Amino acid sequence: MSRPTIENTIPVLAVADLARSVDFYRRTLGFEVEWDAGGICSVGRDECSIMLQVREPVVAGVVWIGLEDDSLFDAVQAAGATVVQQPTNQPWAYEMKIADPDGNILWLGTEPRVE
């Protein structure tokens, strides 16, 4: 018996204000709205999608976003993102963490730097 293929995983983050959140993801990460069903939408770019859903209460989540390189680190800071962790080299990745307006943590990372 063959196993069905799992095509992808898409995180769903809780938000209080969909328009505010969409604006944040556009400004900081360059995401575009992929679809909007009123109260829930998908934003993304390249091979990355995140669903945003209005929920009360908002319970913040964490999403890992793998990057080709660290050039986005400067861009998100310039866009005014709340930096939770400055770029840091770890054994598993060169990473930084930012928070969206609802406290969801976006954990951005690329290959670790060779020192």
Image (cartoon, rainbow, N blue to C red):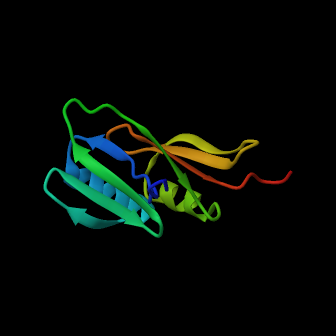
Q: Is residue 70 left or right of residue 105?
A: right
Specify the farthest residue to the right.
115
Residue 12 visible in the shown view: yes
Give the residue drawn at x 39%, y 52%: 10
> Along the horizontal axis of the image, is 40 left or right of 61?
left
Residue 27 in the image, given as x and y percentages of width and height? 37, 62
Q: Residue at x 78, y 53 (%)?
A: 113
Residue drawn at the location 26% of the way across and 33% of the way down = 58
* Nearer-the-camera pick, 79 or 35: 35
Residue 26 in sight here: no
Q: Residue furthest front?
A: 1
In the displayed structure image, the side of residue 40 where residue 75 appears, left or right: right
**Place of residue 69 in the rendered image (x, y in percent of width and height, measured from the top left):** 65, 63
> Is residue 27 rendered to the left or right of residue 106?
left
35 to 16, vertically: above or below: below
**Residue 77, percent across and down?**
51, 54
Total numbered circles: 0
In the displayed structure, would residue 35 be above or below residue 9? Answer: below
Instruction: Kindly identify the residue that appears in the image at 24 percent across and 52 percent down.
Output: 20
**Most foreground residue, 74 or 47:** 47
